[in-house]
Image: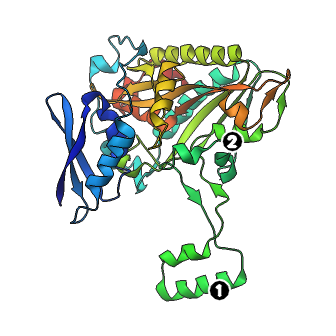
Amino acid sequence: MPIIHVPLSKTLPLGLGPALRSQLFFVSPEILEFSLVEQNGRIQAVTVTTASDGDHGLAEKINYLVETEILKQRVFKPKVIWRSQPGEESAGARGYHHGMFDTLVARGVAFEAAEGQVAFGEPLIGLINYFDRRVRQIALAMPNAQEFQYPTLLPTSVLDTFGYFGSFPHFAMFVTRLHNDIDVYQAFRDEYAVNKRITPALFTRCRNHDYCLPPTMCYHTYHQLRDSTMPSNRVVTAKGKSFRFEAKYYRGLERLWDFTIREIVFLGSHEFVLECRESFLRASFALMEELGLRGFAEVANDPFFVTQDTAGKIFNQRLMELKYELRLNVDSERTIAAASFNFHENFFGDAFRISREDGTRALTGCVGFGLERLVYAFLCQFGLDESQWPQALQREL
């Protein structure tokens, strides 16, 4: 396959390497693989493996990304707020189970249905139910907590309300349908009878874009409470499918396009929301310690796409510690994000006009656990032999 060497017009400090890596696959579908070329303590170039011959304008696109987005960001020293202290029974002491996803596929436990789509059976179903049950118990023990089950589809207008597509256009996944007109149905049927497959012409007959697939569950809650006045602080939890296009970052069970989230939303006063988030942090760390899961939690930021104010958003999130991530080891060197703990200040309260009884806008925060990621990290640490799993988990299962 063709390989292109792209020198950077402006070199980057090594600390901005993760930011560059997180965006490169979104630059062009031609990029199959890439590596960063480091020299003299700087990132000097990107070596790209492409799907076909030609430069595809990749040098211009990559340098545009670097100059308009990556260079504006600051290098932050990691700030860890919790780290596991593994004992004799921890994964760190026993060693990790490498190639776990390949093992799951080989044993018929998991099936790669399509890119970013994985089906699975036991023991993953039981483990997902176990972890969801434990997190749900924490959520429903909080003040004024209530559980909802939301539909899958989310009105596109909900994401328009707070400008989602301006910050995360690369994750968006839309739902459409044939325009409801008998002539359209007839023409589509006739074309399909000839071609025996869906052709690109399909989308010339699809006018509807009123619905999308939800990137996370909490947007359903803000939509539910739009233009309302809450008589008191409240907590809402829900479990459901969420969807994000991950380009070629898809990897086993780590970054699915279609995944399951248990989300908990806090709404109310400044003190209430921050206390809820802090309480959930403590309870989550206690659960990780109870099970002997190895990992840490750190200050983080959202994966914003290229915009003029991205660097400012990231700086504000990190400076104010608006976002924490729980990262769990999948081997001795690598971790994946299994949960996030967020404080939105009055952003969603203002956008959806959610008020408190005293007339002020509700502040919000949320916690989200990616259940497939959580279970995958667990299996990488403890393996498939259930006799080696933590006793607390064995008893409940």
Residue 301 seen: no
Quick one: SS at disc 1? helix
Nearer the observer, 6 or 257: 6
Q: Position of residue 77 (x, y in %)?
A: 35, 18
In the rendered image, which quarter is residue 389 located in? top left
Quick one: SS at disc 2? helix
> Marks 2 and 1: CB-CB under 8 Å?
no
Q: Position of residue 190 (x, y in %)?
A: 58, 88
Which residue is under mark 1?
Answer: 186
- Report the quarter where the N terminus lies: bottom left
Q: Is residue 110 above or below residue 342?
A: below
Residue at 29% x, 59% y is: 57
**Residue lying furthest left in this view?**
40
Which residue is under mark 2?
Answer: 220
Q: Position of residue 114 (x, y in %)?
A: 42, 58
- Residue type at mark 1: give it: Gln
Q: Give the left or right position of residue 259, taking residue 218 as reference.
A: left
Q: Give the left or right position of residue 132, taking residue 71 as reference.
A: right
Residue 323 seen: yes
Q: Position of residue 317 (x, y in %)?
A: 51, 25
Q: Is residue 212 above or below residue 43?
A: below
* First in residue order: circle 2 vs circle 1: 1
- Residue type at mark 2: give it: His
User: How many labels sit on residues?
Assistant: 2
Q: Is residue 2 above or below residue 202?
A: above
